[in-house]
Amino acid sequence: MIAILAEWRKAHGILEEVRAAAEHYRGPVPKKIEVGIIMYIPATALRPTRFATEVDFISVGTNDLAQYAFAAEWASAHFARLADAFRPAILHLIQMVRVAVHLRGKWLTPGSRIDSGMEHAGGDILVEGELALSSRIGSWCAPGPLHDAAA
């Protein structure tokens, strides 16, 4: 989980070292490897522009994002109802990320299925509009109501 840009930069630096070593010992490798993050942590989702500027793509881990945003544990029947990716606060975070990614020409994918607590009952619910593959081909790329707020 990447929480701050310094972690991303360190991980990306390690990847570049490994890429260079592979090229040295094995021969030519792609100069550019598309690398991104899965956004699980609310602190990361609240600053999507900073990450979208540096990564090639962002996946949103909706289940974990909801769980961490509401400090709600899936295993607790009392708190599981709070860890719902359909709650307006979570949808707002996803929208902020979507707009930031779109404005930088990057791509966005869902990092997991949204199950709204139904996973434990045996039923997964997929949100058709959200899970439209990626922003390059899906509905996540279109600027939405937060377009002006994200600028």
Image (spheres, rainbow, N blue to C red):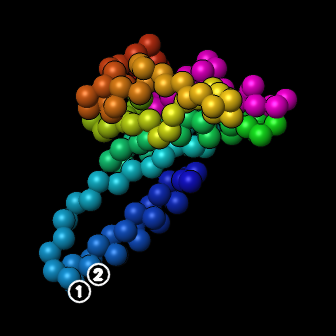
Find the residue positioned furthest to the right: 78
In the displayed structure, does residue 94 sit left or right of residue 13? right
Task: From the top left corner, tell me how far across and down residue 101 is, in percent.
Answer: 37, 34
Where disc 2 sits, the SS reads helix
Judging by the rendered image, the residue that carries numbered circle 1 is: 25
**Crowdedness near tag 1: few (<14), some (14–19) or many (≥20) residues, C-alpha within 10 Å:** few
- The three-letter amino acid code for the residue at tag 1 is Tyr
Q: Residue at x 19, y 65 (%)?
A: 31
Task: From the top left corner, tell me how far across and down residue 128 is, in percent.
Answer: 42, 20
Q: CA distance from mark 1 to mark 2?
A: 6 Å
Q: Residue at x 43, y 24 (%)?
A: 130
Q: Give the residues in magenta.
A: 77-97
Find the residue positioned furthest to the bottom: 25
**The N terminus lies in quadrant:** bottom right
Q: Is residue 30 above or below residue 143?
A: below
Answer whether residue 46 is magenta in the image.
no
Task: From the top left corner, tell me how far across and down residue 8 is, in percent.
Answer: 47, 57
Judging by the rendered image, the residue that carries numbered circle 2 is: 21
Badge count: 2
- The three-letter amino acid code for the residue at tag 2 is Ala
Q: Residue at x 59, y 27 (%)?
A: 123
Answer whether residue 86 is magenta in the image.
yes
Front in this rendered view, residue 74 or 59: 74
Front in this rendered view, residue 136 or 123: 123
**The C terminus lies in quadrant:** top left
Q: Main secondary structure of the magenta part?
A: helix
